[in-house]
Image: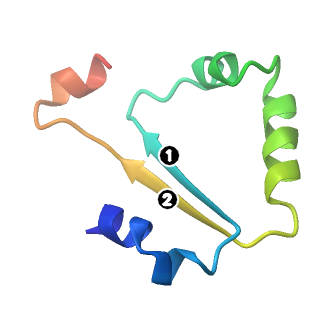
Amino acid sequence: MLSFSFSLKSLTKEFDRKVWVCVFNNFDVKKVIAESRLETLDALQGSLEEKVMSKKFLLVLDDIWEEDEEKDKSK
């Protein structure tokens, strides 16, 4: 339902930026930093701040999980 809403122009046209982030149980900040091609968490935060400063944005944090808890832990 939320993914459908996220794609509705009538809802999302109010936002300058739309971001959908999948958040896993085994979140690894080092992996996120490496994938961003920046060197530090501060650099990543600064880059994000620059992109959303003075902008209206929609941020969806999608808490993805597996039925089998052991599979979820191994991601």
The residue where tag 2 is placed is: 60
Q: Is residue 4 left or right of residue 39?
A: left
Instruction: Give the amino acid type for the residue marked by disc 2 in the picture.
Output: Val
Give the percent coordinates (x, y) of residue 36: 69, 25
- Which is more N-terminal, label 2 or label 1? 1
Give the percent coordinates (x, y) of residue 72: 25, 27
Label 1 environment density (alpha carbons within 10 Å; few <14, some 14–19, many ≥20): few
Question: From the viewer's perspective, is residue 23 above or below residue 72?
Answer: below
Depth check: give the residue in front, 41 or 16.
16
Residue found at the very far left of the displayed protein: 68
Q: Is residue 35 left or right of residue 75?
A: right
The N terminus sits in image quarter: bottom left
Dividing the picture into quadrants, the one containing residue 70 is top left
Give the residue at x 37% y 72%: 5
The residue where tag 1 is placed is: 21
Instruction: Give the amino acid type for the residue marked by disc 1 in the picture.
Output: Val
The C terminus sits in image quarter: top left
Depth check: give the residue in front, 22 or 4.
4
Q: Is residue 19 left or right of residue 36?
A: left
Tag 1–tag 2 contact (CB < 8 Å): yes
Q: Secondary structure at mark 1?
A: strand
Question: From the viewer's perspective, is residue 65 above or below residue 3?
Answer: above
Give the residue at x 39% y 35%: 24
Depth check: give the residue in front, 63 or 59.
59
Question: From the viewer's perspective, is residue 48 above or below residue 24?
Answer: below
Give the residue at x 86% y 30%: 43
